[in-house]
Amino acid sequence: MKTLIFAAIAVLLLAPISLQAKQEKQKAVLVTGASSGIGLKVTEYLIKNGFYVYAGARKDADLKRLDAMKNTSSVRLDVTKQSEIDAAVKFVAKQGRGLFGIVNNAGVGVFSRMSEMADKDILWIHDVNVMGPHRVNKAFIPMLIESKGRTSIIGSISGYVTGAFSGAYSMSKFAVEAYTESLAADLAESGVHVGIVDPGGFKSKIREKLTLFRLTGSYELNQQLTDEQNVELQKAKEGNDKLKEPDEVAEAVMHLMMSDKPKMRYMVSPNKGGADITMKMLLTRLIQLNSDQPYEYTRDEIVALLDELLKADELLKTE
Ligand SMILES: NC(=O)c1ccc[n+]([C@@H]2O[C@H](COP(=O)([O-])OP(=O)(O)OC[C@H]3O[C@@H](n4cnc5c(N)ncnc54)[C@H](OP(=O)(O)O)[C@@H]3O)[C@@H](O)[C@H]2O)c1
C-alpha cells in the first residue's frame, strides 16, 4: 500500500516536469492565416516536423477545426487588429513554450487596374499584407530574441514581377521584400533570422476570393450570386484546381525554420516559366537602373560583380 502511495506521489510530482521537458524540447511556431491554402499546408508540415503550432484564424469554425489538429492551439488573430495581436502574445506567453518562429502568411489581394483602383482597397491590402507582418513581428520580437528564433513572410514573385492588374497586390509584396531586408539588418546582432518565401501560383482560396471581390466587392466565400457570377466563380475554381498543392512552399518554410543555414529569400515557382520571368524582370531592372548615368557599369564590370557576389553566396552556404 505504502509503495503504491509513493508511486502515485512520484507520478504526480514528475508529471509537470516531464510536460515541461516536452514543452522545452518542442519548438513553437505561430502561423497567421492558417485557415486555408498555404497557411494550412505550412501548419500541417510544421506539425509533421515536430513543431507545436499556434494557428491564427478569424472564424469560429476555422478555430475549432485547427484546435482539433494535434500539437496545435488555434489563436484568434486578425492581423489588422492590435487588440487580437496583444491577446495572442499573452496567450502564447502563458503556454510556457516560448516562441521559436513566426510564419506571416495572412494575405489578401484585389486585381484591378491602378487607374481604377479604390484608395480604400489599396489601403486594405497594405493593412493586411504589410502592416500585418510588421504588427505581429513587433509584438513577438522579445520572445523571438529570447529563443534566438526565426520569423518569415510569405511574399510572392509578385514582389518582383508586376503587370496592369496586379499593381496594388504587387506594391504590398514589393514592400515586404524591403521590410524583410530592413528587419534582418535590425535583428542581425540578436540571433533572430528573418526570411521571405516568394511563391508563384499554387492552389489556395485566394483566386476564388479575388474573383468574388471583383464581382461583388466582398471577399465572403458564401455569397448569394447571380447565374452569370456563378459561371465566373466556377471558372476561377477550375483554374485553381489545375494548380499544384503548395507543398513546395511549405518545404521552403521548413528549410527556413529548420536549416542550420536558412536563406533570406526562397523563390518557389511551380514551373520553370515563373522562375524565368522573375529572373528576367530582376535583370531588366538592373539594366534600366544602370544605364545612362555617370557611374554606369560596363558589361565586364557587371559580370565581374556577379561572379564576386555568387562566390560570396557560395561561401555563406559552406562556411
Ligand atoms: N496561392 C498562391 O498562388 C500565392 C502565391 C504567392 C503568394 N501567396 C501568398 O500566400 C499567402 C497565403 O495566401 P493563400 O494563397 O494561401 O490564400 P488563402 O487560401 O486565401 O489564405 C489566406 C489566409 O489569410 C487569412 N487572412 C486574410 N485576411 C486576414 C487578416 N486580416 N488577418 C488574419 N488573417 C487573414 C485568411 O483568413 P480567412 O479564411 O479568415 O479569410 C486565410 O487564412 C498570402 O500572403 C498570399 O499573398 C499566395
Image: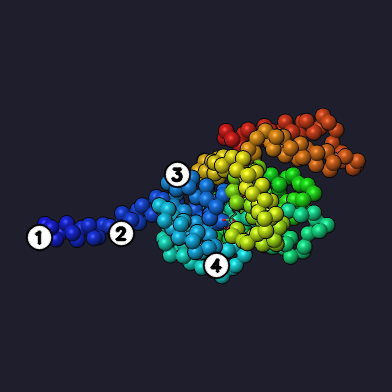
First in residue order: circle 3 vs circle 4: 3
Indicate which label's residue lies in the foreground, 1 or 4.
4
Q: Is residue 217 visible?
A: yes
Secondary structure, mark 3, is: loop
Q: CA distance from mark 4 to mark 2?
A: 29 Å
Q: CA distance from mark 1 to mark 3?
A: 43 Å
Disc 2 target residue: 16
**Amino acid type, mark 2:** Pro
Indicate which label's residue lies in the foreground, 2 or 3.
3
Disc 4 target residue: 84
- Crowd rating for badge 1 (residues with CA inside 10 Å; few <14, some 14–19, many 20+): few
First in residue order: circle 1 vs circle 4: 1
First in residue order: circle 2 vs circle 3: 2
Disc 1 target residue: 2
Asked if residue 61 lies left or right of residue 181, the reply is left
Ligand 1 position by quadrant? bottom right
Instruction: Tell me where residue 235 appears, x and y as whole percent.
Output: 66, 47
